[in-house]
Image: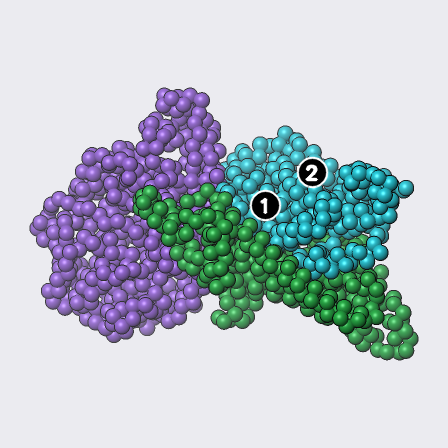
């Protein structure tokens, strides 16, 4: 059987290559950002407030005369790691049940779908802020709810992919030949579903990065003077009178990173061609019950 | 936007989307009307299924919402009483009054039944009824969200249509590029860019504050146009892309070609046939995004300092004003549920007869 | 644990609200100021003024009076032309009794005349009252009013009206000045132009007190008919009359020819416009939407470059930190001293206010009667000494502290954090919601270290009382320790010296230094001038320390 995707084939797309270069850069910043930063991101310079980009400060200085480039570099780690934290939570909470639900029977499926629907009605920003209100303010606390709200996306996509493969004839054949359910899941389903999960993970990381930027922009979980992308953006907004160009820099950084992740996800999706599952923005709540008509649907599909 | 919306993949997304939530009975045995009895059974199953879906969703999401308060380590009685008056006896008395001495599930049920009657409790901090605070601020976000949807439909719709008609041309390519860029820009970044461009640099529009439509329609529009624009940009991009893709496909269909051959005016073909059939997926995006825009309005509020739900949320999160937080979450999630249902039902109804599109 | 900062940043400045008024009017505000840098701390603390607790007063003394001068009347009425369009915060209420921010006094002064006034240096002078005389025992004071005064609605402004005003301020249930007026036990009307205030104790600061909101006279016809309308429809006897008012937007006023000092008012019209975003203020000046605007220090350069004139007007506003010297580690005097020495106030002034203002170690600005020159450089920046003091206090390896701030002062908090780090004090910044600050900082007194500021008071002794006395609102130690008798005595001493007497300045200054050195519960940072950028067509803006006035201001065609 032909491999569904290969990194090589994806890399042939220029957009994917650019995206990977950008993401590698972000990865380097995440690991070594504070070390590589040209200046101490915390050093206040009373004589260099609101300087524009120049030789000494490549991206200018902020309201305390701190070097913006260094702050953004040092702020990468917190922004990226917390985004990954949320994605990790979503991945674990979403994919497991997503695969399991296909094999655990209708009632589990029904319940899991209803919880998914319910979670999707909670806008992440409201939910995350509400959780910090309840549990105390911190970036970690704020990203757990974001992760929980990412889980439904993983769940739905994994479930759909698993459903597709689990009902495939070769799987039925394997079952008929006496393969255990676990074996079927592991060998046949999981391997087929993984690419879908990978694509979803890339899109979800983009979404999580936006979420973390927005939360830090709102001041959730930021402990000064630690810099974050959203935090830098937020303070820029307060000093537009002095430096109207300032917010463009962190804004562009966020947009480029998110764009790279999306481009990568798209590239994978494109390579895999038609018939594979794209991450479509389905309805938030599916009005049909998975208990009744959908079941009909499934039978008819198999029939 | 906003609910961690998956930026719907770039132009390459397969155009095959069924209008939202549509059950695809077509697969079972394409049309030929089913026997009447079977049809009524399906309808009943759908209705029952719908309720079976809706009720648990509302219960689950409201329970999550309520239990957040129970998880919190804040001490409402102490908050209300203030440090001096918070003697153990007074705290116990107040906890009884607030019903906080009951088990969680009982508290939840009481809260929910009260909520159904429009009573979301009172703010711990200001003692103002939560429902009143929310009602005061809801119009701000609704104004922005509704205008954003309209803008997205107009901007995205016309860009997508023109791009499809002139596909391959400079406009088409331009739209593609702008759309890719726009969908990576979060609303709060777009908002800031708009502030810089229109308010700080050009002094054209106010960059913050809110004026109700009852005071002055012109002022109201002037204050919400930038936030709405910020919010609508990403959705406009999605709509333009989606509409372009499906319109291109529809325009290549035989019946359109046929109509052109028959010499029908192009404009009429476009509006009557092509757009009508191609609009489904784009409308779905719009419909699904609308309730999320209410939440997305938080971003716009933050940038433009509008006195909306988001500001209320942040303020009450700071003061750990749990009833307000719970009330907000409940109202917003119910709003999402209800609007989503309405949108899906409308779309189903609109497209009830042309199963053929997009499948 | 920091809290969401952005929300606060917007709302903090609204600063509505005496602590309790909060509950009445809060979340409804429709405009929220975004960036604080302009007057953050100031307005916040201004509200403290509204909530000042009753002062306990004691002692004895002699009589005092102030000379009377009548405005040289007549003339000029016909010559009043031009309009000042002033960018300034609109008041929380146009009713001086329910106004909940000390800051409001500037806007209210347009509509209301007060019984006395403060000159540019904060010294009391006649207003509606031409003279006053204390009884020999200092327990009552008799004021003489100008004859023939009238409110803009035609109601006579006589002693009876004053009595009704003071009694309303004391009794109206939502009055925010009741505690300040509590020292007045009885108002006796002697004649239409004379009244006597019987005091609960000796208090020579009454003429100062009546120069502010407490002494602003409202037409009794207006408040007996409908006190609920006053917050939006004020009726006073001030230099201007309000003609239209759009909350959160602007107020239009016209000259009041019946104002007792109308000959000094050369403006035909006046508007107050609230522009909530700092970056738009300059634009408003350039477009001519306003011709006098309140700006932040860091906007001065661009305003000058755009051709506007700048007035840096000294004000009573001083930024400071409230510090609980009863809470560890601040219970060690050396730690507090170390913090004082570790702060580079000059650098802070440079960054926070672009150098406008002055480094300060005391509650009053230079030039004010209470300013004590001996304190001019109490804690010069000396990180080495700070480290040494820390070691002495038992923290040779540094110490961790938490600094609370309403996020309007983020930038200041971060700068302090960085300066203190250099001497080994690591600071965690904790954002507190503006709405709860009054409660926790002033009433519960549960915040050990907070960025704060004072907007000043009409009476300097009242200011000291608020800051240092046992029951003072801003005495953050007030619940856990007793104010030393040295400080209490010094404060009481200052109350019992008549304002005009030769020993008043020295007594007041001694009280200042006694309080500042014995009770280091306030770490004074820098004074905050009122900076106006204005069109060259505007001339004669007076430099008033306490309340901005408009007598003598002209606008050329």
Q: Mark 2 points at which residue?
A: A26
Say which residue appears at 36% left-offset and 40% top-offset.
C446
Q: Looking at this view, name the residue that lies furthest to the left.
A: C136
- Res B24 seen here: yes
Image disc number at residue A145: 1
Give the colour of chain B: green
Dot 2 or dot 1: first in sequence order is: 2
Say which residue appears at 76% left-offset and 68% top-offset.
B38
Query: Which type of secondary structure does the marked residue at label 1 adopt?
Result: helix
Give the colour of chain A: cyan
Image quadrant containing the N terminus of chain A: top right
Residue situated in front as seen by the camera: C233 or C83: C233
- Res C380 seen here: no
Vertical side of C55 occupied by C149: above or below: below
Residue situated in front as seen by the camera: C5 or B67: B67
- Residue B198 location (% of width, % of height): 60, 59
Q: Which chain carries label 2?
A: A
Vertical side of C511 occupied by C98: above or below: below
Q: Which numbered disc, 2 or 1, marks the residue closer to the eye?
A: 1
Marks 2/1: CA–CA distance? 24 Å
């Amino acid at each position: 059987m032909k491999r569904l995707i290969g990194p090589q084939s994806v890399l042939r797309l220029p957009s994917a290559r650019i995206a990977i270069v950008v993401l590698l850069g972000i990865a380097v910043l995440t690991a070594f950002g504070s070390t590589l930063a040209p200046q101490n991101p915390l050093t206040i310079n009373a004589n260099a407030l609101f300087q524009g980009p120049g030789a000494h400060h490549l991206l200018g200085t902020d309201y305390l005369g701190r070097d913006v480039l260094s702050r953004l570099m040092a702020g990468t780690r917190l922004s990226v790691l917390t985004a990954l934290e949320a994605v990790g939570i979503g991945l674990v909470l979403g994919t497991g049940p997503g695969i399991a639900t296909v094999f655990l029977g209708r009632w589990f499926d029904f319940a899991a779908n209803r919880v998914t629907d319910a979670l999707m009605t909670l806008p992440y920003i409201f939910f995350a802020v509400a959780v910090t209100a309840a549990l105390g303010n911190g970036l970690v606390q704020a990203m757990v709810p974001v992760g929980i709200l990412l889980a439904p996306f993983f769940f739905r996509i994994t479930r759909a992919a698993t459903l597709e493969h689990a009902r495939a004839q070769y799987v039925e054949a394997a079952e008929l030949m006496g393969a255990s359910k676990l074996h079927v899941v592991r060998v046949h389903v999981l391997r087929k579903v993984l690419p879908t999960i990978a694509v979803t993970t890339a899109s979800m990381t983009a979404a999580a990065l936006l979420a973390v930027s927005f939360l830090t922009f709102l001041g959730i979980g930021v402990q000064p003077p630690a810099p974050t992308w959203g935090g830098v953006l937020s303070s820029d907004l307060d000093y537009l009178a002095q430096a109207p160009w300032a917010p463009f820099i962190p804004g562009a950084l966020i947009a480029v990173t998110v764009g790279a992740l999306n481009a990568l996800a798209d590239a994978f999706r494109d390579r895999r061609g038609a018939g594979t599952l794209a991450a479509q923005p389905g309805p938030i709540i599916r009005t049909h019950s998975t208990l009744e008509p959908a079941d009909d649907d499934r039978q008819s599909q198999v029939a | 936007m906003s609910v961690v919306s998956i930026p719907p993949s770039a132009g390459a997304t397969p155009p095959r989307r069924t209008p939202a939530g549509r059950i695809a009975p077509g697969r079972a045995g394409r049309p030929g009307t089913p026997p009447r009895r079977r049809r009524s059974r399906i309808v009943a199953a759908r209705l029952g299924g719908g309720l079976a879906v809706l009720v648990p969703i509302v219960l689950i999401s409201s329970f999550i919402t309520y239990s957040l308060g129970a998880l919190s380590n804040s001490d409402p009685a102490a908050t209300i009483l203030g440090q001096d008056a918070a003697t153990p006896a007074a705290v116990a008395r107040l906890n009884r009054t607030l019903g906080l001495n009951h088990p969680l599930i009982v508290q939840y049920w009481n809260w929910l039944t009260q909520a159904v009657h429009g009573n979301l409790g009172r703010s711990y901090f200001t003692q103002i009824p939560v429902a009143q605070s929310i009602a005061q601020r809801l119009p701000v976000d609704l104004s922005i969200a509704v205008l954003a949807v309209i803008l997205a439909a107009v901007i995205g719709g016309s860009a997508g249509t023109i791009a499809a008609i002139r596909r391959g041309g400079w406009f088409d390519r331009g739209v593609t590029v702008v759309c890719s860029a726009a969908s990576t820009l979060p609303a709060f970044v777009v908002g800031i860019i708009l502030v810089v461009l229109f308010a700080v640099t050009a002094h054209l529009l106010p960059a913050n504050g809110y004026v109700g439509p009852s005071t002055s329609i012109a002022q109201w529009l002037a204050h919400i146009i930038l936030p709405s624009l910020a919010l609508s940009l990403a959705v406009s991009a999605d709509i333009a892309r989606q509409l372009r893709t499906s319109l291109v496909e529809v325009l290549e269909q035989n019946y359109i070609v046929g109509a052109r051959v028959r010499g029908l005016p192009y404009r009429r073909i476009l509006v009557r046939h092509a757009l009508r059939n191609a609009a489904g997926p784009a409308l779905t995006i719009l419909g699904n995004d609308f309730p999320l825009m209410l939440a997305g309005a938080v971003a716009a509020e933050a940038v433009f300092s509008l006195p909306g739900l988001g500001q209320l949320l942040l303020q009450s999160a700071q003061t750990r004003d749990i009833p307000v937080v719970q009330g907000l979450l409940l109202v917003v999630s119910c709003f999402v549920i209800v609007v989503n249902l309405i949108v899906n039902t409308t779309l189903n109804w609109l497209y009830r007869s042309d199963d053929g599109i997009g499948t | 644990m920091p809290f969401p900062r952005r929300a606060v940043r917007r709302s903090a400045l609204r600063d509505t609200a005496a602590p309790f008024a909060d509950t009445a009017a809060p979340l409804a505000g429709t405009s929220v100021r975004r960036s604080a840098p302009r007057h953050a701390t100031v307005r916040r603390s201004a509200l403290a003024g509204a909530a000042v607790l009753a002062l306990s007063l004691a002692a004895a003394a002699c009589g005092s009076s102030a000379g009377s001068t009548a405005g040289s009347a007549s003339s000029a009425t016909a010559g009043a032309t031009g309009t000042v369009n002033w960018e300034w915060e609109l008041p929380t209420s146009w009713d001086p009794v329910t106004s909940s921010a000390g800051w409001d006094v500037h806007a209210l002064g347009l509509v209301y005349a007060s019984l006395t006034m403060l000159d540019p240096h904060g010294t009391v002078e006649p207003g509606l009252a031409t003279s006053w005389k204390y009884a020999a025992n200092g327990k009552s004071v008799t004021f003489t009013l100008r004859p023939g005064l009238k409110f803009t609605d035609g109601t006579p402004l006589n002693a009876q009206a004053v009595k009704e005003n003071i009694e309303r301020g004391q009794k109206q249930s939502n009055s925010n000045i009741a505690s300040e007026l509590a020292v007045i036990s009885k108002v006796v009307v002697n004649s239409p132009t004379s009244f006597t205030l019987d005091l609960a104790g000796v208090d020579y600061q009454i003429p100062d007190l009546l120069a502010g909101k407490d002494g602003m006279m409202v037409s009794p016809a207006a408040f007996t008919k409908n006190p609920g309308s006053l917050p939006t429809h004020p009726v006073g006897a001030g230099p201007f009359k309000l003609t239209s008012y759009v909350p959160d937007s602007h107020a239009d006023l016209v000259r009041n020819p019946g104002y007792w000092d109308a000959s000094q008012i050369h403006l035909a019209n006046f508007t107050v416009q609230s522009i909530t975003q700092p970056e738009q203020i300059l634009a408003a000046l350039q477009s001519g939407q306003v011709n006098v605007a309140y700006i932040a220090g860091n906007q001065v350069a661009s305003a000058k470059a755009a051709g506007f004139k700048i007035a840096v007007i000294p004000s009573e506003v001083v930024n400071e930190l409230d510090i609980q010297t009863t809470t560890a580690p601040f219970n060690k005097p050396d730690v507090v001293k170390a913090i004082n020495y570790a702060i580079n106030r000059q650098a802070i002034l440079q960054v926070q206010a672009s150098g406008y203002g002055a480094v300060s170690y005391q509650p009053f600005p230079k030039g004010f009667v209470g300013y004590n020159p001996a304190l001019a450089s109490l804690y010069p920046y000396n990180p080495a000494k700070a480290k040494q003091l820390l070691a002495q206090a038992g923290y040779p390896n540094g110490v961790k502290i938490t600094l609370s701030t309403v996020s309007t002062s983020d930038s200041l908090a971060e700068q302090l954090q960085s300066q203190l780090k250099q001497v080994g004090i690591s600071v965690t910044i904790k954002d507190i919601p503006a709405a709860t600050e009054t409660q926790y900082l002033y009433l519960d007194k549960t915040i050990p270290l907070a960025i704060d500021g004072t907007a000043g008071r009409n009476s300097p002794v009242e200011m000291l009382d608020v800051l240092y006395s046992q029951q003072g609102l801003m005495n953050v130690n007030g619940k856990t320790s007793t104010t030393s008798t040295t400080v209490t005595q010094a404060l009481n001493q200052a109350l019992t010296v008549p304002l005009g007497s030769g020993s008043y300045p020295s007594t007041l200054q001694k009280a200042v230094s006694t309080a500042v050195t014995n009770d280091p519960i306030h770490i004074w940072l820098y004074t905050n001038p009122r900076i106006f950028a204005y069109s060259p067509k505007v001339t004669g803006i007076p430099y008033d320390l306490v309340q901005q006035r408009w007598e003598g201001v002209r606008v050329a065609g």
